[in-house]
């Protein structure tokens, strides 16, 4: 009494949970994509459903009007992305991109069944959603996407660098199509969000940023983790209306991408809680933008972060060889009593010893540091402890030099600053 | 004054007390090198090799390389230290030098071996790179590879060195990131293929089917280069693993000095119970003698615990003789490359004289060549023994290997039948890639990697021939289970999960019990075993051995599949008894004659652990027992059986009670002797005697496989059961006990006074 393969498998395989009841297939009926605002396009390699929604430029999402992004100077993209290359980002040829996939695992078996792109046209913002009505239509969806991307130059995404784009690349490889993105710039807002808002908001999911930065609350939004199963269910039920929440969710994501870009850019003009001013200062420092850093220090309401920002700015000045500015900043840092940092003392000592050749001034700074440290004795952190040897060496060397100076009977030429 | 090795060998041979217990002392004369023609390699490579010290090629190297250059898949079978790595490195490097884009994939069973190989490769590559315009790059790609390095390896690594698990979960499911590798893959090198047997081998064979499938997608047709230790069926195993036809290369041309191979069986100290002097202490005695005379020695022990024991004893010996205890070092799997280099250097410089190791050092890692190898306890297979013995032996001068037998039945049998080491190996590597459970897991993984077409057969060769008939049926089943979806002409993966993650290459039952160490407040998971083994090994009150450490199982939470344990130092181990019932469902093959009948097929085994015995270490005394309360498990697997005629009792002139004892005795001994013929574990199969089998109504013996669906042992046994029975009979006849003992048919308490003699009668009957 031999069992068929299937019966044997049922006995042996305990990992697959009970088979779900088969739902009626409506494969012969024409599916009504128009009911959700979509259009079925037939191409040589398969069918694609395209759903378009056009938003006027004055459209407001959260606190922002979409068209303001068109007016934002391109240097702000460099700030938001902390990357000088992004000054070349042209918002008019950029594409905002967000995909819905069959799973978070990645790998060759994860499909992007809905690819949402958004871009500015002459007088509107267009959200275009490409949907794969069944797996065998994938080549058509990708071909359409490739055609759209051919005229574009940059991506703006949320975690696209690690997730969406690699998955799309993978899909192209599997369908033997080429994904031409070598010259594309990419602004990934997840990294920007983490830089600017993680300190004060904690988690930087798109929804969290939407809620706290854009002040925008979604209603009846489908949770992300339900999306893959909804697609699988649709493949059997062919119930187009069940897909509407996914399309809506995806479209909302894209609008938020635009709005978040704006809000992020604004932080570099005016930084308020929950944005992190040290992140802003670090960005200016990294990009070498002295002018902006000065402006920022003048205009910002710092609350607790002024000292740290000043420290980063001083580093910037030093890197750009603006020694007078650096000296001023370090002097301010050692005078203020809010936060103690060793760095300004050491940097001033080095400045006076090596650049200005003013040994006594250098020694004065080192002595002040030692005093401060002794006062803070109980509060020594491990790092500060390490400095003690450094300081002693420095002091000894300076004392030696001073002695030599006095012996040779004359001051060494002071370097004119 | 220290002795040379020749002097020690001489002294040993004249030592009566030692020689009385030597069952075999084989002298293998020195052999000079046999060279073959220099193969047709690119002159730049020949040049680089020459600079590296290689100007001539042994005949097996020439043979191997020439076969590969003419487009054949090969399996190379040569002993340790015979230059087998050149057999694959040469053609691979050759290919890369001639075609810059060429790629190769190397598979090693362990990370340590992979890392060693890459170091060795680098030496040659550095020289080769001087002559060519681009740099040849080889990298390991495994769990330790830093994320920052992975991108470079994927796009520009010429030789990617990895292990089966990484290939299975890290590379194949992400093959779109490895386009350069797969498009240009010329060679797949699989080392130590004898390692891939049973479950592991069956899984690997399927992983290779997936690998070939991916290669086909990218248009490459790599050649396979396999390496194996000496087993009975290297060509067959290689062909089963890869699905390709193989050329066997086994004409070893490497030279060696005079070798002495000694089998030592410690004397019996208790005749009735069949107990012998401790093989650990004997090994220590023997080893210490060499080490104190500055002779570089390696001692192989079978468990980490024994390694620690021997290390402790030997270091005490050193101290007593006013020598530094650091002369003797330990070695375990998991040692970092830095530590291995340190030991290797120490051996070369003479700072280390003795090394005590588990079989971790058996696999090819380069530690140089030593002079003596002491093997404490038969390692379980002939091939392992030969590999461990192979660690001793230099080009010039003599070397010595000594195998010290323990009292376990197989050890005893080997001690008395050493011819197995010197004639053709009896042991086969058996796999069954079409085991349904294993196949199902890999078809899921394959569907994730590339959609199946509606006419596709899993496991076809390059020409698209062959392959599994049942592929489409399996796909239909998976569709019913809603994990794949038929769309157009293809079957696509349709689930959020990542199938490879939940497939372990070393087990077939996907239900595991997790073992948790509660010795400290920080609970730690120390391991996982499948539910069948769990009933035997981690029932309440069991003593469980893991990584050389004993644990007491405080509670087995069967429902939640968790076993809670804490560390102990017990003087006994536990041995659980299974109450087993077996039902034949389908017969695959049968044969009958006037003496009896035998066959193999599919069975349902219901088993439950009912009680356990507490057995004292060393003496094997039974010091207690306990009951086990666990639910029954049902297992669908394969079995081999032999049925005696219903009137066998009268034919042999015995009564039924005694027949029962005899059957039990035969079942016990078969369980112990089968591994000599089919390489495997105690956990791979079991034996069951039945007075009246429900299938045939006759007194029968069943040997059933532990893994759902079986891995091919039953089928193999059907063909070789007579050889196995002959060996079993020899073991009984050679055993010095009167009525039975643990070293042959089992203790008298188990098989009764007539167990041994009746077992002999039955086996004689079977063989007539």
Image (cartoon, coloured by chain):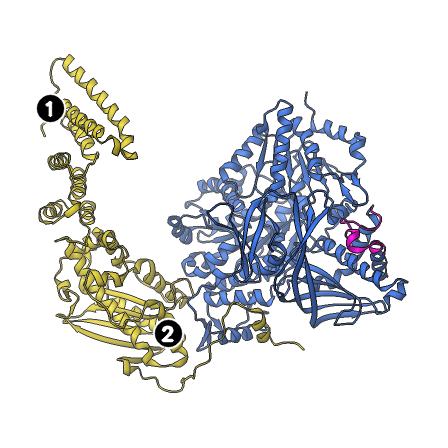
Chain colours: A yellow, B blue
Helix, strand or loop at label 1? It is: loop
Query: Residue A414 shows which numbered tag?
Result: 1
Q: Residues within 10 Å of mark 2 (few under 14, many from 20)?
A: many
Helix, strand or loop at label 2? It is: helix
- Quarter holding the C terminus of chain B? bottom right
Q: For this rendering, which residue is in front, B555 or B90?
A: B555
Residue range (magenta): B737-757
Q: For this rendering, which residue is in front, A211 or B86?
A: A211
Which of labels 2 and 1 is toward the front?
2
2 or 1: tag closer to the N-terminus: 2
Q: Magenta residues: mostly which secondary structure?
A: loop
The residue sitting at 59% across, 28% down in the picture is B325
The residue sitting at 90% across, 62% down in the picture is B653
Residue B396: percent from left, percent from top: 67, 32
Query: Residue B61 shows which numbered tag?
Result: none
**Is B488 within the magenta?**
no
What count of labels does the image hold? 2
Residue B686: percent from left, percent from top: 69, 59
Determine which quarter of the picture holds residue B133.
top left
Q: Is residue A283 left or right of residue B171?
A: left
Above or below: residue B709 compared with residue B670:
below
Q: For this rendering, which residue is in front, B644 or A53?
A: B644
Which residue, given by chain and number where applicable, does mark 2 sit on? A231
- Quarter holding the N terminus of chain B? top right
Above or below: residue A138 compared with residue B27:
below
């Amino acid at each position: 009494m031999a069992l068929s393969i299937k019966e044997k498998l049922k006995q042996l395989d305990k990992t697959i949970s009970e088979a779900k009841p088969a739902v009626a297939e409506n494969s012969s009926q024409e599916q009504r994509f128009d009911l959700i605002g979509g259009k079925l396009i037939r191409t040589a390699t398969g069918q694609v459903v395209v759903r378009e929604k056009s938003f006027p430029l004055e459209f407001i999402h959260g606190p922002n009007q979409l068209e303001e992004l068109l007016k934002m100077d391109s240097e702000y993209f460099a700030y938001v992305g902390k990357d000088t290359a992004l000054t070349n980002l042209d918002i008019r040829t950029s594409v905002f991109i967000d995909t819905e996939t069959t799973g978070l695992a990645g790998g060759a078996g994860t499909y992007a069944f809905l690819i949402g792109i958004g871009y500015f046209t002459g007088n509107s913002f267009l959200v275009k959603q490409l949907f794969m009505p069944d797996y065998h239509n994938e080549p058509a969806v990708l071909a359409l996407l490739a055609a759209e991307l051919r005229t574009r130059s940059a991506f703006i995404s949320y975690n696209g660098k690690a997730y969406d784009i690699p998955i799309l690349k993978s899909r192209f490889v599997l369908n033997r199509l080429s994904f031409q993105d070598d010259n594309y710039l990419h602004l990934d807002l997840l990294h920007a969000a983490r830089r600017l808002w993680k300190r004060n908001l904690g988690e930087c999911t798109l929804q969290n940023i939407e809620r706290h930065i854009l002040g925008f609350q979604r209603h009846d939004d489908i949770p992300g983790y339900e999306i893959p199963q909804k697609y699988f269910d649709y493949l059997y039920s062919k119930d187009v209306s069940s897909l509407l929440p996914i399309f809506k969710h995806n479209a909302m994501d894209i609008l938020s991408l635009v709005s978040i870009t704006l809000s992020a850019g604004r932080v570099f003009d005016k930084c308020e809680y929950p944005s992190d001013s040290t992140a802003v200062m670090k960005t200016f420092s990294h990009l070498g933008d002295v002018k902006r850093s000065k402006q920022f220090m003048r205009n910002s309401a710092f609350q607790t972060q002024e000292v740290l920002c000043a420290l980063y700015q001083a580093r910037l000045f030093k890197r750009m060889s603006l020694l007078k500015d650096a000296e001023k900043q370090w002097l301010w840092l050692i005078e203020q009593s809010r936060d103690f940092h060793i760095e300004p003392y050491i940097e001033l000592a080095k400045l006076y010893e090596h650049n200005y050749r003013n040994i006594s001034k250098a020694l004065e700074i080192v002595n002040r540091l030692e005093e401060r440290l002794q006062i803070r004795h109980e509060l020594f952190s491990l790092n500060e402890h390490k400095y003690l040897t450094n300081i002693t060496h420095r002091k000894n060397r300076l004392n030696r030099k001073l002695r030599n100076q006095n012996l040779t009977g004359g001051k060494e030429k002071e370097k004119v600053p | 004054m220290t002795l040379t090795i020749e002097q020690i060998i001489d002294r040993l041979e004249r030592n009566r007390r030692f020689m009385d217990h030597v069952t075999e002392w084989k002298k293998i004369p020195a052999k000079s090198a046999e060279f073959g023609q220099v193969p047709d390699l690119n002159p730049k490579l020949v040049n680089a090799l020459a600079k590296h010290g290689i100007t001539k090629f042994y005949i097996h190297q020439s043979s191997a390389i020439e076969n590969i250059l003419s487009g054949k898949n090969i399996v190379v079978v040569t002993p340790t230290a015979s230059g087998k790595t050149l057999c694959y490195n040469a053609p691979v490097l050759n290919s890369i030098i001639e075609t810059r884009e060429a790629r190769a994939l190397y598979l090693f069973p362990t990370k340590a071996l992979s890392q060693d190989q890459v170091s060795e490769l680098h030496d040659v590559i550095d020289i080769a790179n001087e002559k060519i315009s681009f740099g040849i790059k080889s990298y390991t790609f495994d769990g330790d590879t830093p994320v920052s390095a992975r991108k470079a390896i994927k796009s520009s690594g010429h030789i990617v060195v990895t292990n089966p698990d990484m290939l299975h979960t890290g590379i194949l499911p992400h093959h779109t990131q490895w386009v350069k590798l797969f498009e240009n893959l010329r060679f797949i090198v699989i080392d130590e293929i004898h390692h891939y047997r049973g479950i592991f081998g069956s899984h690997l064979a399927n992983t290779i089917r997936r690998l070939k499938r991916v290669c086909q997608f990218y248009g490459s047709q790599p050649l396979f280069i396999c390496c194996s230790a000496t087993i009975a069926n290297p060509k067959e195993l290689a062909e089963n693993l890869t699905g390709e036809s193989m050329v066997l290369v086994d004409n070893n041309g490497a030279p060696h000095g005079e070798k002495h191979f000694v089998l030592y069986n410690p004397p019996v100290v208790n005749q009735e119970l069949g107990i012998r002097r401790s093989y650990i202490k004997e090994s220590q005695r023997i080893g210490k003698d060499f080490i104190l005379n500055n002779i570089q020695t390696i001692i192989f022990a079978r468990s980490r615990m024994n390694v620690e024991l021997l290390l402790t004893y030997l270091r005490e010996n050193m101290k007593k003789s006013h020598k530094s205890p650091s002369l003797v070092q330990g070695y375990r799997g998991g040692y970092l490359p830095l530590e291995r280099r340190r030991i290797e250097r120490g051996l070369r410089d003479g700072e280390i004289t003795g090394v005590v190791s588990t079989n971790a050092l058996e696999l090819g890692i380069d530690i140089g060549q030593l002079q003596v190898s002491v093997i404490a306890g038969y390692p379980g297979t002939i091939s392992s023994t030969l590999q461990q013995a192979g660690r001793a032996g230099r080009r010039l001068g003599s070397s010595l290997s000594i195998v010290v037998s323990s009292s376990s039945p197989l050890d005893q049998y080997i001690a008395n039948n050493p011819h197995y080491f010197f004639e053709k190996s009896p042991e086969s590597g058996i796999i069954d890639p079409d085991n349904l459970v294993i196949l199902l897991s890999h078809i899921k993984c394959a569907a994730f990697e590339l959609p199946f077409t509606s006419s596709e057969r899993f496991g076809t060769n390059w020409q698209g021939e062959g392959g599994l008939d049942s592929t489409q049926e399996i796909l239909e089943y998976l569709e019913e289970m809603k994990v794949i979806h038929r769309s157009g002409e293809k079957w696509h993966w349709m689930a959020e999960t990542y199938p490879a993650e939940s497939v372990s290459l070393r087990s077939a039952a996907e239900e595991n019990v997790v073992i948790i160490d509660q010795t400290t407040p920080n609970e730690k998971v120390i391991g996982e075993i499948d539910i069948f083994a769990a009933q035997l090994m981690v029932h309440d009150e069991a003593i469980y051995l893991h990584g050389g450490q004993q644990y007491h199982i405080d509670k087995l939470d069967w429902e939640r599949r968790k076993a809670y344990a804490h560390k102990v130092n017990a003087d006994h181990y536990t041995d659980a008894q299974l109450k087993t019932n077996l039902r034949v469902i389908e017969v695959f093959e049968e044969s009958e004659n006037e003496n009896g009948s035998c066959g193999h097929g599919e069975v349902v085994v219901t088993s439950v652990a009912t009680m356990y015995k507490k057995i004292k270490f060393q003496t094997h005394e039974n010091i207690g027992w306990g009951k086990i309360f666990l639910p029954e498990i049902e297992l669908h697997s394969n079995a081999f059986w032999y049925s005696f005629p219903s009137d066998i009792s009268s034919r042999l002139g015995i009564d039924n009670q005694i027949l029962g004892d005899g059957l039990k005795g035969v079942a016990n001994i078969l369980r112990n002797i089968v591994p000599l013929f089919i390489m495997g574990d105690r956990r791979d199969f079991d034996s069951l005697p039945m007075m009246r089998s429900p299938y045939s109504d006759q007194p029968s013996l069943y040997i059933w496989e532990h893994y759902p669906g079986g891995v091919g042992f039953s089928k193999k046994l059907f063909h070789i059961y007579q050889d196995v029975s002959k060996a079993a009979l020899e073991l009984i006849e050679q055993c010095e006990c009167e009525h039975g003992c643990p070293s042959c048919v089992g203790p008298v308490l188990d098989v009764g006074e007539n167990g041994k003699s009746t077992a002999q009668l039955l086996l004689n009957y079977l063989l007539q």
